[in-house]
Image (spheres, rainbow, N blue to C red):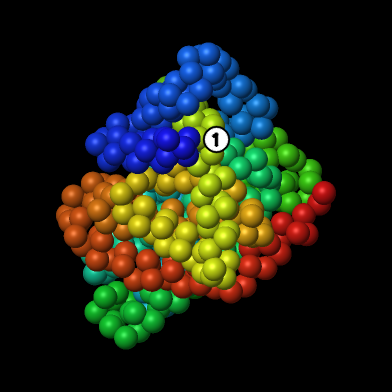
Amino acid sequence: MESYVFGLIGFVLLVVFIVLGIPIAFAGALVGTIGLFVIGGPGVAIHFLGSLPYSEVSFYAYTALPLYILMGEFAYHGGYASGVYRTGQAWLGKLPGGMAIATVIGGAGFGAVCGASVASSAVLAKVCVPEMEKLGYDKSLSAGTVAACANLSSMIPPSGLMIVYSIFTEQSLGKLFIAGILPGILLTILFSIMIFVRVRVNPSLAPSAAELISWRKRFISLKHGLGIFLIGGVVLGGIYLGIFTPTESGAAGAFLALILTSVTRGLSWESFKNVLLSALKTTVMVLFIIVGIMVFTQFLTLSRVPIVVSEFLADLPVPPFLIICCILAFYLFLGMFFDAISMIALTIPVLFPTILSLGYDPIWFGILAVLMCEIGLITPPVGVNCYVVSGVLNNVSLEEVFKGVFPFVIMNLIAIVILLAFPKIVLFLPNLMAR
C-alpha cells in the first residue's frame, strides 16, 4: 500500500476523532504517533516524539503569542470595547441603525487590541445589546450584529488566527498583521452599509435615537476611544514603520495596556493575577494544539500526502482561480463543524504547498483563510460566536442570533469576492512596509 494512503486514512481518522469531541491537540498527537509508528517504525516515531514538543515551540518568534493574548486580556479588563462603543454611539447614533453601526465600529476598535473573537463576542454582547434593547432595536439585529462584528478581532491585527497561520507556514507575522488592516476596514464598511440599508428599508428594525448629540459632546466622546487608539497605534505603527518586530510590538502593546488599565480602571492585585492566569491558560491551549498538530504534520509529511495533493490539484485541467475558489468553498464547509484554530491547523499543512505551487501569494491566501474561518464562527451548527452571544444574553435565543448573522455572512462572502478580484487590497500595505 502506498504511504500516502496511510496519510489519507490518518486524516479521515483525525476528523472523526474531532467530531467525536476529542480535543484537536490530543487527537492530532494520537493519530500522528500511530502514523509515525506505521510508516517510519519505532525508531522514527520515538525520535520525533522526543524532539518535536520542544523544537516546535522553542522559537523566539513564538513569544509573540502570549504577549498579544496578554494585551487582549488587559484590554478586556480595561473596558476598551465600551469606550469605543460610546464614541461611536455619540457620532452615529442618529443614523438609521446608528447604534448597530456603532457596535460594528466598537468591534473593529476592540479588535485592534484583542485578537480573540470569542472574547469580543462576550464583551460586546454585555456592553452593546442592552443599550440597543433600550431603544427598541430588533433582537436578531442587535445580537447578530454583535456576533458578526466580533469576528473583526480575527481580521484586524493583532489576530490570534494570523499568529497560528504564521507558525504553520513560516510567513512574516508583521506582514500578515498589516495585510489585515484594509480587509478589516472593508468588512467594517460593508457591515455598516448593510445595516444602514436594512434599517432604511425597514425602520421598525431600529428606531432612531431620540437624543440629538451636540458637536461638542461628540468631540468630547473621543476620549473614550483614546486607549484603543494609543495601543493600536503603538502596535501597528511600530510594525509598519519597522520600529518593532511583531514580538517587540506585542510586548510594547501589553505593557501600555497594563499601564492604561492600571491608571483608568484601578487594576487590583487580584485582578492582575486573574489576567495573567487567563492569558497563561489560553497560551498553553494554543501551544498544545500546535504541538499535537505538528506531530500529525510530520506523519503527513512522511506519507507524502501534501505533495500528492499539491501535484493532483496543480495538474487539474482547470484554471488556478477555480482551484482557489474550491479551496475556499471547502473552508466554508469545514466552518460548519470546526472551530477556527482547528480549521487552520488541520488544513494548512495539506493545502499550503498547493497554494505555493499555484503561484498565489501566501500572505494574500492567509487573509482569505482567516476570513473564511471568521464565517465559520457565525454559521450553524458550530457558530461559536453565536453560542457565546446567546449564552450571555438570557433573553435572546440561539435561533434569533443565527437569523441575525445571516446578512453578515452574505457581506463576508462579498468581501471574499472583492479580495479575490482585487488582491492588491491585501498586499498594498505589506508591500510598502519598512524592510
* Above or below 84: residue 36: above
Q: Is residue 125 visible?
A: no
Quarter holding residue 329: bottom left
* Above or below 295: residue 193: below
Q: Nearer the viewer, residue 146 or 316?
A: 316
Residue corresponding to mark 1: 301
Q: Residue at x 58, y 59 (%)?
A: 314
Q: Residue at x 28, y 66 (%)?
A: 404
Query: Residue 51: where, in percent of width, then height?
Result: 57, 17
Answer with left or right where residue 45 lies relative to residue 330. right
* Above or below 413: residue 268: above
Answer with left or right where residue 325 lies relative to residue 34. right
Q: Is residue 195 visible?
A: yes
* Above or below 46: residue 261: below
> Which residue is farthest right?
435
Q: Nearer the viewer, residue 132 or 265?
A: 132
> Which residue is farthest bottom?
201
Q: Nearer the viewer, residue 92 or 119?
A: 119
Q: Residues within 10 Å of mark 1 (few under 14, many from 20)?
A: some
Query: Residue 21: where, in percent of width, then height?
Result: 26, 35
> Which residue is farthest front?
1
Query: Residue 226: where, in percent of width, then height?
Result: 59, 52
Which quadrant does the N terminus fall into? top left
Query: Residue 137: where, in percent of width, then height?
Result: 26, 69
Q: Residue at x 49, y 30 (%)?
A: 299
Badge 1 element: helix
Q: Amino acid at mark 1?
A: Thr
Q: How many labels were placed on the picture?
A: 1
